[in-house]
Structure formats: C-alpha cells, structure tokens
Amino acid sequence: MSTQATKVIEQLYGVTITEISTLPSYIDQNFLVVDKEGTKHVLKIMNSEESKRTTLLEVQTLAMSFLRQHEVPAQTAVPTTTGQLMSMEEIDCGHGVQTYCVRLLTYIPGKTIQRSQVTMQDLYHVGKLAATVDKTLQQMVSPNLDVLLKYDTLWSLLNIPLLEGYLSVMDGDPLQEVVKAVIEQYKSHVQPKIISFQKGIIHGDLNDQNIIVIPIDTGHHEVSGILDFSLLVNGCYVFELAITIMYLMLENPSPLDVGGAVLAGWESIMQLNDDERDSLFLLVLGRLCQSLVYGRHNVKKYPDNKSYILTTAKSGSRLLVKLWELGKKEVERKWFSDARTFLVSK
C-alpha cells in the first residue's frame, strides 16, 4: 500500500517522497510522508464508504481551513498541483479497485494528549479551545452546510438508543447491565431536554487521539493541532463538551478531576443552560458506552486493527463502573464545584 500511496502523492502533488510510514487510524489509511526537502505531511486515504460522501468531505475540508484562517490550530489540506484540496482516486487496497478520497494534510508537531502528562490548567485550555472551535464554526459559510444537518452517524449522542441493537457484543459481560441502564436513563432523562440544547456545527470527535499538544514552560502543554474532522456535524454544543470530557478522563491518573477543569474552560467561552448542565453526566456516560460497544462490534469487522479500535476498552470499562457507582449527583457536584473554583481563580 505504501508504494501506491507514494505514487499517488507524486502524481497529485508533484512531490518526491523519500520516507513513508503508516500512522494509526480507526478505519482509514494514514501515512506520515517526508519529501526530499525534509518537509513532513500526512496522507489520509478515507475508507471507501465515507469516500462516497463527497459533499460532506468538502465541507469537512473547508472547516479545517476556515478554523486555521481564524487562528484555531487545525490540521489543513494541501492543494494538489491543480488547486484541489481533495481528490477522488481509484486504488486497489487489496479488495479490488475502489474509489477513495485522498488528502495531503499539514503535519502537526507534538504528541497526542493521550500520551502526554497534562495538568489541570492544560485541560482548562482544552475546554476553552473546544468551545472556541464551535463558536468559530458559527461564522462558516458554504452553500453545502445543509449536508451536516442530514449527516447521521451511530456515534452521534442523539443516537444513544441505537446502542440497543449492538448489545449482544456485551453478552456475558456484567458491564452490559450498566450500559442498558445508561440507555434507559438517557431516554427518560436526556431525550426530553434535547429540544432546549444550544445547537450548531461541532467537531464531534475531540478525543484524546485527535488533540496534539507540545510541552511549554513549567510542565504545561499547549495544543498544537486538532485532527480528524470526519464526524463534523450540526449537533448540540453540550455533546462536544461531553465527548471531550469523556476521552480526557480515560488515561488521566485523576479522572474525576478532569470534568471540572474542561467545563470551566468551556464555560469561559460558552455558558451551558440548565437542561444541558443536568444532562452532562449521562451524555459523558453515553459516549463511554458507545465507545465500548462499537469498539467490540468494529473489532469483528476490522480484526487487523484490534489494538487501536479497543484503545478505550481497558480504562473505559473501569471508568464506566466508577462513574456509575458514584452516581450522577456525586459526580456532577464535583464537576460543577471544581469548575466554579477554577473560574474564581482565573
């Protein structure tokens, strides 16, 4: 595959590649490439299913450039020799020739936040940046934005009830009962409130592998880049916050401290309303359940990528049990009091 990838880059971008290596990805193909000048880029070949959604991909690519123009550190696409930001190419990846969306993206220096020892101050800034991303996207203009309204994905937090159709992958695991209970509470407690949630375009997947950080002075980090806009959607802002909190809790040695710091950063830009505040805990749990259930489901579809797909599984299972046992009232009390303390100290 790397030989084909090299050929595609040379044809589309007129660049001579001297080094190429694979990068982790959920279901796409990603390559780190170095040209003869020593410049690094990332070649992203979307999976064949999502490659069919060309208008959606164009809007996602536009959002990346739009954020970068507004000084948000997003990864962006490099134009081909003919000025295109994405190209549809016929490639044989071992399953016969199929059409794939190909983009050459800027390389972001740093490490994923998952692999970095971040401080609570860093997490405050991530929360602030997550809200800034969504607030900035409010200004984006394109005749194709309605495609984001129609884009429906299993991963949307609107679709927590759809987890029920996949629960058999948890058969025999005591966690299945917790997941069922989260779905029931979501249906009774969160669904009726969605009508009052603030809505707009959200990144939709600010997970711990899509946020790149670099160390700065005194042990802190700053975000050098945001990756992967493939779940960009017209959704609810509180979903973005819940997703960010959930993934940042996963590898943190003090997971319960994460929510307050991220929440404080978020609310320094966008305030939650009462219904959003009251739903945050179950939304965090909902995304955790999605990650655990769909992870197990996708391993059956993509067995070669098992270790990456199940990244959430180990720490995620522990975290779900811990949050569930503590309960909504206790966890929210901590998050909201921590956030108030954070905002007072600013």
Image (cartoon, helix red, strand yellow):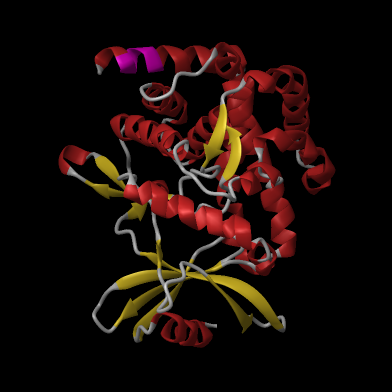
- The answer to which of 150 and 247 lies nearer the viewer is 150
- Identified at 54% across, 62% down, the residue is 25
Image quadrant where one finds the N terminus = bottom right
Q: Position of residue 307 (x, y in %)?
A: 58, 60
- The question of residue 342 being in magenta is answered with yes
Among the 4 quarters of the image, the one containing residue 199: top right
Image quadrant where one finds the C terminus = top left
- Identified at 41% across, 37% down, the residue is 136
Give the dominant element type of the magenta stretch: helix, strand or loop: helix
Position of residue 276 relative to residue 294, above or below, is: above
Horizontal placement of 72 versus 311: left or right?
left
Horizontal placement of 301 versus 206: left or right?
right
Specify the segment rendered in magenta: 339-343
Q: Position of residue 222 (x, y in %)?
A: 27, 43
Decide if residue 95 is in sight here: yes
- The answer to which of 64 and 291 lies nearer the viewer is 64
Horizontal placement of 312 versus 69: left or right?
right
As drawn, which residue projects farthest toward the front? Answer: 143
- Identified at 74% across, 18% down, the residue is 192
- The question of residue 111 being in magenta is answered with no
Position of residue 317 relative to residue 17, above or below, is: above
- The answer to which of 236 and 302 lies nearer the viewer is 236
Q: Position of residue 256 (x, y in %)?
A: 46, 25
